[in-house]
Amino acid sequence: MRYLPIVISCILLFSCANTKKNSINDDNQVKADSFFENTTKYNIIGTAFYSTMYCGGAKPPDDIEEFHAKPREMIETTIVFKLKTDTTIFVQTKTDTNGRFETKLPEGIWTLSFCDDFENKNKNAMDILEVTKNCKLFFNSYYGERKVIKNDSNLILHFSLRCNPCDPHIYMRP
């Protein structure tokens, strides 16, 4: 049981390691093609945003809290959709310069994460959270899920980015 987080991290690392550099209109990289062969796929078009957490010790002033809560577009970032019932089945899509993305997904509940290419165009968030590209726990964390049952041309994904999980003192903060 104590190895479960390591196993999950390895699966997530593998999915991001095979990221295909694609634009919003390219075909998505898909694992387990046989799963998708005879399945209805729905067009999913949306925008991905992120907000950051305040990672200081004391309660910040209201303007600092508002700054961290403000949604920002996830620019040129690979988003990973994993089938909740079988995490070996996943679809990756890349956002454009406005955080927009387009993909096709079969019906199901899909978990959300993103790859370390987020660091390339979203440097401000990396600096705020004091995260380095080496912190795989940050990039391969679970950031929620979405249920797909029909086409969706206005999906909004909001990633609430946590403080640096690789910081050895993270649990000492209030």
Image: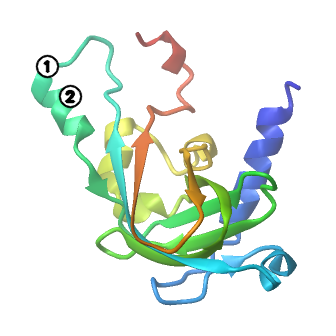
Q: Which residue is nearer to you in this view: 111 or 21?
A: 111
Q: Secondary structure at mark 2?
A: helix
Quarter where residue 32 is shown: bottom right
Task: Check the image and name the residue furthest to the bottom.
Answer: 26
Residue 79 position (above or below residue 164) = below
Cβ atoms under marks 1 and 2 closer than 8 Å: yes
In what quadrant of the picture does the C terminus appear?
A: top left
Q: Which residue is nearer to you in this view: 125 or 103?
A: 103
Left/right of residue 124 with respect to residue 25 in the rendered view: left
Q: Residue at x 53, y 27 (%)?
A: 167
| Relative image position of residue 75 (x, y in whole percent) | 35, 66
Say the numbered circle drawn on residue 22: none
Q: Which residue is mark 1?
A: 61
Q: Secondary structure at mark 1?
A: loop
Residue 93 position (above or below residue 16) = below
Task: Check the image and name the residue furthest to the left.
Answer: 63
Left/right of residue 126 with respect to residue 147 in the rendered view: left
Q: Which residue is mark 2?
A: 65
Amino acid type shown at disc 2: Glu
Q: Residue at x 31, y 28 (%)?
A: 54
